[in-house]
Amino acid sequence: MDSSSFPEVESSSSDINNNNNHNSSAAAAAATSSSAATLSRYENQKRRDWNTFGQYLKNHRPPLSLSRCSGAHVLEFLRYLDQFGKTKVHNPICPFFGHPNPPAPCPCPLRQAWGSLDALVGRLRAAYEENGGKPETNPFGARAVRLYLREVRDLQSKARGVSYEKKKRKRPPPHHTVAPPLPLPPSAGQG
Ligand SMILES: [Zn+2]
């Protein structure tokens, strides 16, 4: 049997055509080991995001290569994603502006939630460097992107009446000590 017909080598990074292998998630679902499952879910999500971004670049007019991609293009991408968003963001003139749970529908637009965008940018930023990009030219780490995310967070927290303080986790102690306390020297009297 000749096994050479399917080289194991992945396509070179310059060619992302026909790279549509869908990993079935059945195997992933079977594994319930929490940290491992979380990690692989993150890795899968990251790969999917990276493919989506690659697709976006490919369909971009005028054509855009990854090496010429700037923070401005990342913003363009994030705004493009808003059309698929599911988070209602009220306009300031909407009577439900600032209401976390509006009692009735309204015509305000659906957007990507800030938390989703923030996590997405983090994954793409990592993927960019894993795919050979240099940290200093990473468009996902651009200042403009950071500012945009902050703006989105402020706007959405006002419009939705929610706070994005980190309170999903166990409440951290109010005092965040920067330096750990010095270890006490072992008391005398050893032996
Ligand atoms: Zn509204």
Image (tube, rainbow, N blue to C red):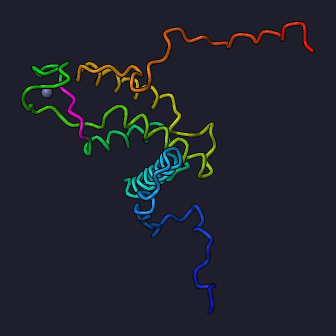
Image coordinates of residue 112 in percent, x first then y, are 30, 37
Residue at coordinates 55% horizontally, 43% vertically from top-left? 126
Residue 8 forms part of the magenta stretch: no
**68 lies above or below 29:** above
Q: Which residue lies furthest to the left in this view?
A: 104
80 and 87: which one is in front? 87
50 and 65: which one is in front? 50
Image coordinates of residue 33 in percent, x first then y, are 50, 49
Residue at coordinates 45% horizontally, 32% vertically from top-left? 145
Image coordinates of residue 113 in percent, x first then y, are 31, 34
Q: How many labels does the image show?
A: 0
Quarter holding the N terminus? bottom right
Residue 51 placement: quadrant:
bottom left
**44 lies above or below 174:** below
24 and 170: which one is in front? 170
Q: Give the range drawn in magenta.
A: 86-90
Q: Main secondary structure of the magenta part?
A: loop
Quarter holding the C terminus? top right
Q: Which residue lies furthest to the front in this view?
A: 191
Q: Which residue lies furthest to the right in this view?
A: 191
Residue 114 placement: quadrant:
top left
**150 lies above or below 11:** above
Image coordinates of residue 132 in percent, x first then y, are 63, 51
Residue at coordinates 23% horizontally, 40% vertically from top-left? 86
Q: In this view, does 127 lie to the left or right of 99?
A: right
Q: Is residue 23 left or right of residue 160?
A: right
Ligand 1, by image quadrant, is top left
Residue at coordinates 90% horizontally, 8% vertically from top-left? 189
Q: Which residue lies furthest to the bottom in this view?
A: 1
**46 lies above or below 170:** below
